[in-house]
Image: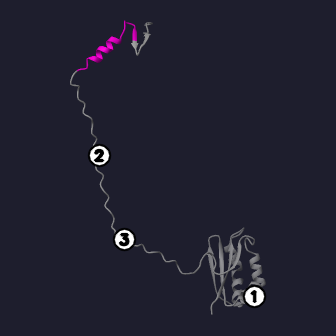
């Protein structure tokens, strides 16, 4: 015959849920065993504890839940409004107690590729060659633009040179 699991999850509040378990855990387990619990398990979670109880019949759970010791223990949780969860099934977020199988990596038959060596970069400088013939036209145009001493003609403008020296 199969069993039906019920969970009582208590989260931390003003006080630690672990301290609540230390104070009320034995009384809850004694009441559960004397009222038909076949299996039980405490699970400590970050920020709380879970008591998982297994009963064969739904009536056994209902009788256990109606006991004054159970009501007193649930009323004394660290946060009875937001930190107490009572629900059917296993506690926490576990679906089963068997560990998950990790997928094995599929081998592609490949080996590590060698890292290609970087080729050194060679800097190539331009070769400067002197002109084949001297440029005489430039020198003539520069002297033609210069006016009398003290004035310079540049791009069509005439300016007086600083003669205050």
Quadrant occupied by the C terminus = top left
Quadrant occupied by the N terminus = bottom right
Q: Nearer the viewer, mark 1 or mark 2?
A: 2
Looking at the rendering, the stretch of residues picked out in magenta corresponds to 134-152
Residue 118, placed above or below residue 133: below
From the image, tell me which residue sits under label 2: 121
Labels in figure, total = 3
Q: Earlier in the sequence, mark 1 or mark 2?
A: 1
The label shown at residue 63 is 1
Farthest residue to the bottom: give it.
Answer: 1
Tell whether 48 sits left or right of 165. Answer: right
Mark 3: few/some/many CA within 10 Å (<14, 14-19, 20+) = few
Tell whether 54 sits left or right of 139. Answer: right
Mark 1: few/some/many CA within 10 Å (<14, 14-19, 20+) = few
Residue 18 lies, in percent from the top left, at 66, 74
**In the image, what residue occupies the spot 68% across and 76% down?**
9
Q: Quadrant of residue 58?
A: bottom right
- Marks 1 and 2 sit apart, C-alpha to C-alpha, by 85 Å
**In the image, what residue occupies the spot 27% across and 35% down?**
126
From the image, tell me which residue sits under label 3: 108
**In the image, what residue occupies the spot 67% across and 90% down?**
56
Is label 1 in contact with label 2 (beta carbons under 8 Å)? no
Q: Quadrant of residue 75?
A: bottom right
Q: Regarding mark 3 in the picture, which secondary structure is present there?
A: loop
**In the image, what residue occupies the spot 63% across and 80% down?**
90
Magenta segment includes 148: yes
Residue 23, placed above or below residue 115: below
- Marks 2 and 3 sit apart, C-alpha to C-alpha, by 36 Å
Tell whether 63 sits left or right of 126. Answer: right
Residue 60, placed above or below residue 128: below
């Amino acid at each position: 015959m199969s069993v039906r699991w019920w969970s009582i999850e208590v989260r931390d509040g003003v006080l630690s849920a672990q301290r609540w378990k230390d104070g009320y855990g034995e009384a809850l387990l004694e009441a559960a065993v004397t009222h038909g619990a076949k299996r039980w398990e405490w699970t400590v979670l970050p920020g709380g504890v879970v008591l998982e109880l297994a009963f064969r019949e739904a009536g056994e759970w209902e009788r256990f839940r109606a006991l004054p010791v159970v009501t007193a223990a649930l009323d004394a949780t660290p946060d009875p409004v937001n930190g107490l969860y009572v629900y059917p099934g296993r506690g926490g977020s576990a679906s089963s107690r068997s560990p998950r199988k990790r997928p094995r990596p599929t081998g592609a038959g490949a080996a590590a590729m060698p890292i290609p060596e970087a080729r050194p970069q060679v800097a190539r400088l331009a070769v400067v060659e002197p002109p084949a013939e001297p440029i005489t036209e430039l020198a003539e145009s520069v002297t033609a633009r210069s006016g009398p001493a003290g004035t310079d003609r540049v791009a069509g403008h005439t300016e007086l040179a600083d003669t205050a020296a």
